[in-house]
Amino acid sequence: MAEVNIPKRKSDEVLVRMVYSGKLAAMDTLIDRYYSLCFGICMAVLKDYDDASDACQNCFVNVFKNIGKFRGDGNFRSWVLTIARNESFSVLRQSKNRRENVYEKMEPALRSREDVPREVFLRIESSQVREVVETLPDKQRLAIKLRIDEGLSFKEIGQIIGSSEGASRVNYHHGIGKLKELLGA
Amino acid sequence: MIIWECIEAKGYLSAGVRGELSEPIKAELDRHVLDCSDCRGELELIEKLFVLRPATPLQLPLEIKKAVRLEFFEAETSYWRKLLPAAAVTTLLVSASLLDKVLFLPDISLLEQDFFVNVWPSEDYDLAGSLVLDDFSEESLNLLFEEIK
Ligand SMILES: [Zn+2]
């Protein structure tokens, strides 16, 4: 039987070292690995496609501009989260006045083709949920979005919303509890 | 069979919705949710929240890569831009000294001082700029030949 060589996925640490030595392809791989997560965070904070895209771009520019400051003792993912958070809040400060009617621009994502009928059903139901989510305090709303949409750990959520791991867990559960109550679920 | 507490089951709900659970855990979770209306309600809520997540723009990774490259390229050009004036001055100095060598040699006045040689312009093109050795003593000629050897 012929042996198949499956190329190993390079760790973030290895890729960062490759970037240090000037390999642009490693930079692209890191971008491919994290742009979606980064956009999700920016979107959760900013609630606007254009602002989130800008913040996400700035995030990666700053990530690589300051790659020399990244010592590799923390992990790269955590570093991206911190910079994404900082970029988002800086854009938010600049564009608070443009935050009305942003949801008209939002295009919810589909999970996969097989899920379409269930997705459609859920989407109709979800429009009501969307309105209710907006009534939640920011920290609860962000904890829910980051946990459900992006799969962030409570520690990582704490990093974004500026609270401890325990406090972000509480924010999440309180938010879910409040949604259940408001939606009569 | 593991009997899960609700608190444990709820910890897996969002990962389950995102399709990130291993088969055995997924099976356990499904079993719990089937029997537990509270967790089932929460699962449905999480599903509804999950479909609200925004799609990532398709062009975004490309735009990010472009922006990052532009930043890097700009950093490099500005580095050269800073060096450019110094480079220009150096080039100017080097070319000026070369011009001096090319256009003004032999420098008559210097030759006069250094070698006590009479050199003057002539209307005769054959002689123009050449040394006139007629009135030189033996000693002076020897010295001169030593110099130009
Ligand atoms: Zn339960």
Image (cartoon, coloured by chain):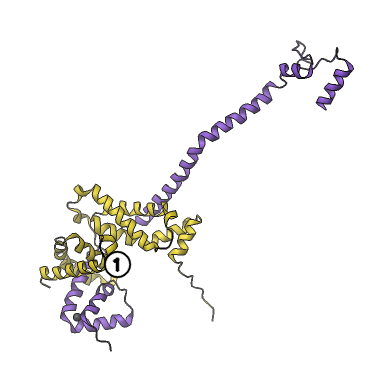
Q: Quadrant of residue A129?
A: bottom left
Tell me, yes or no, if residue A121 can be seen here. no
Tell which quarter ligand 1 is in: bottom left
**Location of residue B124 with respect to B98 vertically, above or below:** above
Which residue is situated farthest in the top direction here?
B123
**Location of residue A56 with respect to B52 vertically, above or below:** above
Of A178 and A166, the residue lying toward us? A166
Q: Position of residue A135 (x, y in %)?
A: 14, 61
Which residue is situated farthest in the bottom direction here?
B1
Q: Quadrant of residue B28?
A: bottom left
Give the residue displayed 68% in from the left and 25% down from the top: B102
Q: Quadrant of residue A176?
A: bottom left
Of A30 and A108, the residue lying toward us? A30
Q: Colour of chain A?
A: yellow
Left or right of residue A98: residue A63? right
The chain that appears purple in the image is B
Residue under numbered circle 1: A155
Position of the C terminus of chain A, as image quadrant, is bottom left
Which residue is situated farthest in the right direction here?
B138
Give the amino acid type for the residue marked by disc 1 in the picture. Answer: Lys
Position of the N terminus of chain A, as image quadrant, is bottom right
Give the residue displayed 16% in from the left and 80% down from the top: B37
Left or right of residue B128: residue A181? left
Q: Position of residue A10 (x, y in %)?
A: 46, 67
Instruction: Provide the chain ID for the residue under circle 1.
Output: A
